[in-house]
Amino acid sequence: MARKMECIAMLLAGGQGSRLGILTKNIAKPAVPYGGKYRIIDFPLSNCVNSGISTVGVLTQYQPLELNDYIGNGQPWDLDRANGGVHVLSPYQQIKGSEWYKGTANAIYQNITFIDRYNPEYVAVLSGDHIYKMDYSKMLEYHKEKDAACTIAMLEVPWEEAPRFGLMLTDDDNKITEFEEKPKNPRSNKASMGVYIFTWSKLRQYLIDDEANPDSSNDFGHDVIPAMHNAGEKMYAYLFDGYWKDVGTIDSLWEANLDLLNPKVDLDLSDPTWKIYSKTPTAPPHYIAASATVENSMIGEGSQVYGELDFSILFHNVTVEEGAVVRDSIVMPGTVIKSGAVVQYAIVAENAVIEENAVVGERPEDMQNLEDWGVAVVGAGVSVGKGAHVAPKAMVDADVKEAE
Amino acid sequence: MTGNNILGIIYSNKYDECLNEITGLRTMGSVPFAGRYRLIDFALSNMVNSGIEKVGVITKSNYQSLMDHLGTGKPWDLSRKTEGMFILPPFSSASNMGGYTNRVEMLRGVMGFISRSTEEYILLSDCNEVMNIDIDELMDFHTDNNADISIVYQHGDLPKLDNIMELQMQEGGRITQVALSPNTSGAVDYSLNMILMKRSLLQRLINEAVSLNHESFERDIIQGNVSKLRIFGFAAKGFTRTIDSLASYFKVSMDLLEPQNCAQLFDPDRPVYTKVRDDMPAIYGLGSKVKNSLIADGCIIDGEVENSILFRGVRVEKGAVVKNSILMQGSFVATGSTLNYTIADKSVAITPNKTLSGAENYPVFVGKGIVI
């Protein structure tokens, strides 16, 4: 039996992230690179550690290899602990057969034994898909203060975006009175962030009941939360007012990266009191050559810039040759952009090669029809041939031949 | 014993005095270098990359920052259940009050550690040599020549350090003559003080030296045995530099702005490991102008930077100009200030509208934490 923990976290990291297309062909969404050196999962993991939660179960299912490898023993997040620490929990075989995680609630249900080992009072259920910095310990204080069965973190979103979210209606005390799932005509702009704290004894019972219900889709949002609400459990909304972004689509991933270059955006990764930890590459400082011009950009270690860089994010070990131009783009680790190539409004994944004079993406102001415009994506390991053109909005996951 | 049968020994304090501006508060091994490293990272990484699994780090004084940097040895993968990294602080006894003055005393002080080890060979290394060397190749050279002792050397101007061995070799590399810091001009073959031999031989040589009251490793153990033992010189390849003064520290650092040098020293097949600081990637603001510079994680640059090396977490405000300078971790240059040929130690702050300017052979040095 492990030592008792007041609160442990369960991190849902099994999502495929199908709307990210080729970027998640071989990796799970939480493993998608973000912000010049991070992966999305670094945010919830670092939030846990910084909030004093040192036991984290990471539930993986889709393409777990890279994610498991990345998390390793948890050392980069200081989660290699003698008691607790990070545990990767994949579906496993049991006497009655093996079962994939059928839904988010089922994923937790299948790991009740894991949670029980720590005999926690509270369990935080987190999503591995969001970029945000949040102190879960404050939310836990709030949860205890309200003596709630479930506390859901919420964010006030612009009304016009509200229909994309799961919304909550609350009374004056922020007690949740009603839920609305992606309504056409929203009555609230308080959106759920996918961050929950449950009193474990309550959640445990609801998970068992949910599993016994053959009509349930075993999902937190669809089944467990409504069931708790219908049974009259005390459910509270916890207001969060910092930066939060779901990076579920190519556009939102692109935006969330470039948000880091906007001083007006409230996402400071340089704060020494709330560091975002990640596995740091072994590379020397990056080099900016005499021929380079760099403005408004973020650059990771080991990169070499001889060309022009504007409003872009370069991960580690990226090479931008002399005469190449990268603007309004995100270039992931190990990619080479050769002389004369132009990369604009694009996401180029790891270890790709953009050959000489190739053009990836298009500026919206150069488009005849803005309907056809969008961020271009080049997949991992892809080579875009000399002089070739990758159209805006295109997703390329096979080599592109040299232009005639 | 599971590794490659070599025990590594690193002298972390050797030649501290030649860089006393920077080593005032630290050891030679913990001198910051190349934007994110400490000098000991090169010796440690060279050893680890060749499969050495046990390394003893000899310390003498001022080793707090070194211990802070090394921790348990995890970044070099030397935090092990068996073997790994051992910090060997001075051992004071009735006959020895702790402060070592020469290599023989240092080795004698850690003889217990050396005797208890089981590796067949021992590799001795200093920290003021910046190089990326393949120790497997050195080992092959050693055994192919049936050598008793192999000394890594390079061709160049003799460093201005005590007891540097100038080597005369015959064809094939056998050393025939050793001169100690001779008065020479022009390039010579000189020892980089990375020395490989059998552990048992070192034990015997040190015991002999102690019983004969010999004090100098270079004079009594190497020079004195040139005709009796088979001592060979192994030429270092690639970017290899010796730091023997603040001016050479500056020059060696600036040499890394040549991408070819950087590529040799930071060969991805033999990476240089260091302690991780978890900074965000560097951010360049609107209107920033950066040319020919090495910039580490965590820097925020809104001003102008040219021919410089910026360590982790340096901030250069809009309107500030940094040229031909080395700014260590956490330094800050405010708007309107200009730095030229300046070395700023950690956490230096340059307030608005100041000008500091040194010369290439005599850079201005600003000590740790000073506010100008």
Image (cartoon, rainbow, N blue to C red):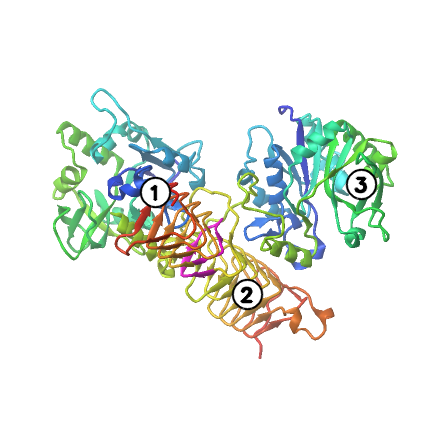
Chain assignment, label 3: A
Where, by quadrant of the figure, is residue A202 drawn? top right
Q: Residues within 10 Å of mark 3 (few under 14, many from 20)?
A: many
Chain assignment, label 1: B
Q: Amino acid at mark 3?
A: Asn
Of helix, strand and loop, which one carries label 2? strand
* One can see residue A176 in this view: yes
Marks 1 and 3: which is nearer the front?
1
Report the side of A81 relative to B354 (left or right).
Answer: right
Between the C-alphas of marks 1 and 3, the distance is 62 Å
Numbered range of the magenta stretch: B289-304
Between the C-alphas of marks 3 and 2, the distance is 45 Å
Number of marks drawn: 3
x and y percentages locating residue B96 in the rendered image: 22, 24
Q: Amino acid at mark 2?
A: Val
Looking at the rendered structure, whether the residues under marks 3 and 2 are on a common chain is answered as yes
Marks 3 and 2: which is nearer the front?
2
x and y percentages locating residue A9 in the rendered image: 67, 35
Look at the image and tell me in which quarter the C terminus of chain A lies. bottom right
Decide which of A22, A36 is in the foreground and name it.
A36
Where, by quadrant of the figure, is residue B161 drawn? top left
Q: Is B205 covered by the magenta stretch?
A: no
Of helix, strand and loop, which one carries label 3? loop
x and y percentages locating residue B306 in the rendered image: 40, 59
The residue labelled by disc 1 is B367
The residue labelled by disc 2 is A326
Q: Amino acid at mark 1?
A: Gly
Report the side of B251 relative to A122 (left or right).
Answer: left
